Image (spheres, helix red, strand yellow):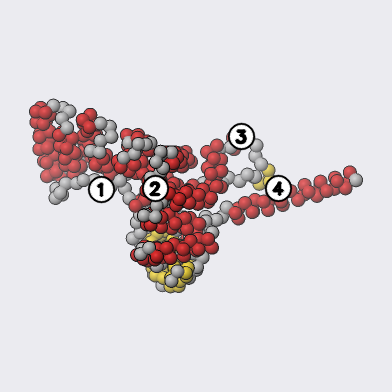
Amino acid sequence: MSGIKLGHYIDSMRLLPSLIFVKLLLVAICSQGAAEPYGKYFVESGADWPETAGSGAAATLSPPLSESAARELARAINERLTEQEFRDGPYAMGLAETLDELARAQEAAGAVEDARRSRERALHLIRVNEGLYSASQRPILQAILDSLRREEDFAALDERYDYFFRLYGSGQPPWNDLRWRAAMEYLRWQREALRRGLDGDPMPRLLRLHGLHEDLLEELRLQAEGPDFRLLAEAVHSQLKTFYLIEDLIQPQPLFRDQRNGFYRSEDPRDFNLLQERLENLQRTLRGAGRSLIEELLTVIPPQAPEVRAEALLALADWLQWHGSTREASALYESLWAELHSQGLQQLALNWFSRPVPLPDNGVFFPSGPKGGDGPMAVLLTVRDNGRASADVTTLAERWQGSAIRLKRYIAATRFRPVVENGRVTAVENVPASYLLFRP
C-alpha cells in the first residue's frame, strides 16, 4: 500500500512542472483582456483631447513686437514700475499688474528668466494683498507654467505643479471653482509626466496618482449633503484614465523562474518590489473597480442631467469594450443609442456612433508634443461588430510600405467602439481613415 502511495507521489511530482505551466498559461490568457492603448503608438490625423492640452495659452503682447521693440518697451515699463514703487510703496497691489505687463515684454524680448522673476514677484504681491487663495493669481501662475512648458523644462514644471497643488489646498475641501480646477489640472499634469517618462521608475508616481484620486473620491462621498454629481463625474473620469495607465504601464512579474527541470519560486527578498506588488494587486481588480466606480456615479446623477449620465454610460461601455467584454458593451452601446434618441440628443448619438472610434477615446495615452512620426497615412478600415478592425493599406505610397506593417499590427490589436445604426451595433467596411504613426 505504501508502495502505491509512493508511486502516486512520484507521478504527481513528475506532473508538477506541467501543471504549473498550465496554470501560468491560464493566468496569461486571463490577463490579455486589455487591448492596445490607442494614442500611444498611432493616432488619427487631427485628433486632440482636453487631456493633452497644456495649462492654457499665456497672455502675449498684442500686436506682437520685434525683439528690439520689446526690449525698449520693457525698459519703459520698468521705469514706470520704479515710479509706482516710489509713489505707492513696494507692496502696492497695482504693482502686480505692471509686473505682469513687464513679464510679457521681457518674454517677447527673449529675457525668459527675467520674465519669470517678474511674475514670481507679482504672485508674492497678490498673496500679500489678497491672501493665499486669491483668484488673481491664476493667470500669472498659468503664464509661469506655460513659459516652462515652452522652454521644455519639464523637471522645473513638475516642481512648479507641486507648489501649485499645495497652494490651492492639495485637493482638499472646501472646494471653490478655483481650488477644484487646480486639483484637476494637477492630476492631468501627473498623467502627462507619466507619459513623458519623467521618472526612471514610474511606479511611485503612478501609485500616488491613484491614491490622490481615491482621497478625492472619499472626500466627495463624505460631503454632508452628498457628493456634487458634477464634481464626482470629473473625479471618476479622471481616475478611470489612471486605471488605463496602470493597465498599460504595469507588467506583472513572473511568480516562477525558469530552471532546467521546471520552475521555481524565488524566495530572495531582493527580488521583492513592494510598489510592484501593490500595483499588480491593484491591476488585478481594475476591471471590476472601473465598472463599480462608474456605476456609483450613475446612482447620483439626477434625471435633469441626461448628458452627464450619457457620458458616464459611454465611459462604462468603452471600458468594457477595451477589456474584451464585447457582448455586454454592445448591449450598452445599443441601449445608450436608444436613450439618446428618446431624449432628443440625436447629435450626441451621431458624434459617438456614426463611425468606428479607436479606444480609449480620451487621450490618456497620447504623447504630449510627440516628436517625429510617419504619415498621414490614408487607409480603409473594416470593423466587425465586436470592435476588432483590419486596415487595407494597399493604396499607400511606396515610402509608407515599411510603416504600414506596423500600423496594420497596431490597428488589429486595438479595440474600436463600433458603429450603431438604427439602434443596432453594425459591422462596417472600407471606412476611410488617416493616421499618424509615431516612431519608436
Q: Amino acid at mark 3?
A: Pro
Distance from label 1 to label 3 (Cα)?
50 Å
Instruction: Tell me if mark 2 has few (under 14), some (14-19) or many (20+) residues whose alpha carbon lies within 10 angstroms of its own.
Output: some
Is residue 130 shown left or right of residue 272? left
Q: Residue at x 19, y 46 (%)?
A: 60
Is residue 291 shown left or right of residue 66? right
Instruction: Tell me if mark 3 has few (under 14), some (14-19) or many (20+) residues whose alpha carbon lies within 10 angstroms of its own.
Output: few
Residue highlighted by disc 4: 262
Distance from label 4 to label 1 (Cα)?
59 Å
Residue highlighted by disc 1: 57
As displayed, is residue 376 above or below residue 10? Answer: below
Q: Residue at x 46, y 65 (%)?
A: 334
Which quadrant would residue 43 be assigned to in this image?
Answer: bottom left
For the image, the number of numbered tags is 4
Q: Residue at x 25, y 35 (%)?
A: 134
> Closer to us: mark 4 or mark 1?
1
Q: Amino acid at mark 1?
A: Ala
